[in-house]
Amino acid sequence: MLVDKLAALLAAPALALADLSGPWPPGALAIPSVAALLLPAVRDRLVRLARTVITYTAIVLLPRSPAEVIDLLYRGCRRDRVPLLRRDLVCTARELRKELEHPAGHSTDPDPRMSQGTFTFLFSLDDPAQWKPRRTAISSATPAMTARAHADTTAFVPPPGHRDLYRDLTAHTLGSAFRIVFGRPPTTEELHRLRPGIDDINDMVKNRSLRPRDDLRQRTWHETSRLIDAHLDDPRFLFHADPHFAALDHGARIDVAGADLLQSITVQTADLFGHMLLLRHEHPAAFDHDIDAAILETLRLHPLSDSLFRTPDQGNPWLASLVMVHRHNWPEPDRFCPTRWRHTPRRALAVYSAGPRTCPSFKVSEIIATRMLHDLHQRGIRITPHPRLRHERTFYFGLPATITHHGTPSAHRPPRLPTARLWARRYAARTLFMARKREIW
Ligand code: HEM
């Protein structure tokens, strides 16, 4: 592996200095034997240090997501995990699944500090102790959520024109999320009050903004709080008479309805659908033939979360690139090939995590996204991505596209592609974001 060769090279001068195998003065026989014992440990530590420096320097310098950089550096590696200085790099889906399904040292509670913990709605509510009751409430509501997602008939009809389709996607998926949670369509004012905080979190995750806008998130938080209070006695409310939801304190209720449901449904579904659209543009038959396999393959190539990391009670902290574990050791890893899912068990896909903290409600996104594709097809709506748009890890610059209804051309001007200023902002935002999440130390 290239990284290991470079690491050995970097560590070599220090090892040469510490080379204790030379001639020893008489009477000092005890020292070389201690040195001989210590040398492998010193060498191991130096190689880890060098590997860490190479990995994180590449992550900081290259204009790619951390998961992509790890994939670039380590895809050829033969080991299940590679030790860095402060954590291990989990390299294969098999090893990742083992870690997630049997977290070391947790007899009852797996590690509460999940990667996603930093994306909460208001940072003040990021209380790890609350995960279990929150999760119980969400899991018990999931069958009702999937039924509502299936029953939702509000069609996705983006107006014709050239523009950033990503905004249309989140507008539609926020509407779906609202209908699922509150059992009725939102008013324009409600959407107006909810959307800014959700967009702000999404803008940070997509490296579009440099720092969180607490004022916007506060507004979304207050609106969610108001909506919950107004719907507690409404039988259409997803958590109406739900004992698990009723047992939560006020803050946790807002986090469940707002961050865990409205936010997740809106963003995860928009992202999933965006990736599906771009792939469908190149492989229409695959999507028409077997949409479920096409979704699995979409997620394998474009896992919505970049990486997963944990600090278990026992054993080393670890980090896994979801891009790498779904390509490393896979035949033709970079090719979109839904037919591979005929012979591959679904559990080979770890994009939803696994084990006790696996995503409880991913099906909701799959149902809504499938429906959205169907809507476009039924209404003769054609979406052509901007010809120079690159299919990246995520929608850093939105999804510039041309939308035509029954072939009607649009009179608007084509959308602009990102400028150097936007690239620079993205780079700065990404590095700041990683530093804040303590990913780079
Ligand atoms: C394709 C769509 C989705 C993907 C790929 C996805 C992925 C994930 C992943 C990877 C995690 C674990 C994060 C970690 O271990 O650090 C997670 C957790 C979670 N997801 Fe999803 N998700 C999706 C859709 C959804 C939807 C639609 C909802 C809500 C309806 C949702 C709600 C949650 C919640 C509440 C958790 C935290 C679970 C806990 O605290 O134990 N996700 N998701």
Image: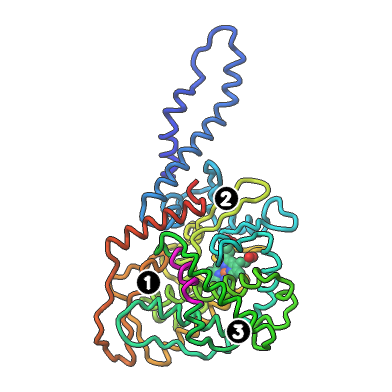
**Helix or strand or loop: what does disc 1 sit on?**
loop
Callout 2 amino acid: Trp
Q: Which residue is mark 1?
A: 398
Residue at 51% x, 20% y: name it: 20
Disc 2 from disc 3: Cα separation:
38 Å
What is the x, y in percent for residue 211?
44, 60
Figure check: 268 above or below 146: above
Decide: marks 2, 3 in contact (CB < 8 A)?
A: no
User: Is the CB of mark 2 within 8 Å of ligand 1?
Assistant: no
Disc 1 from disc 2: Cα separation:
31 Å
Q: Residues within 10 Å of mark 2 (few under 14, many from 20)?
A: many
The region drawn magenta spans: 194-204
Figure check: 186 above or below 116: below
Mark toward the viewer: 3 or 1? 3
What is the x, y in percent for residue 28?
58, 11
The quadrant of the picture occupied by the N terminus is top left
Identify the image's colour scheme: rainbow, by chain, secondary structure or one colour: rainbow
Callout 1 amino acid: Gly
The reply, left or right, for residue 200 in relation to residue 261 is left
Of the residues under marks 1 and 2, which one precedes in the sequence?
2
What is the x, y in percent for residue 90?
55, 52
Residue at 41% x, 34% y: name it: 10
* Ligand 1: quadrant of the figure: bottom right
Q: Which residue is mark 2?
A: 318
Q: Which mark is residue 182?
A: 3
Residue 193, magenta (yes or no): no
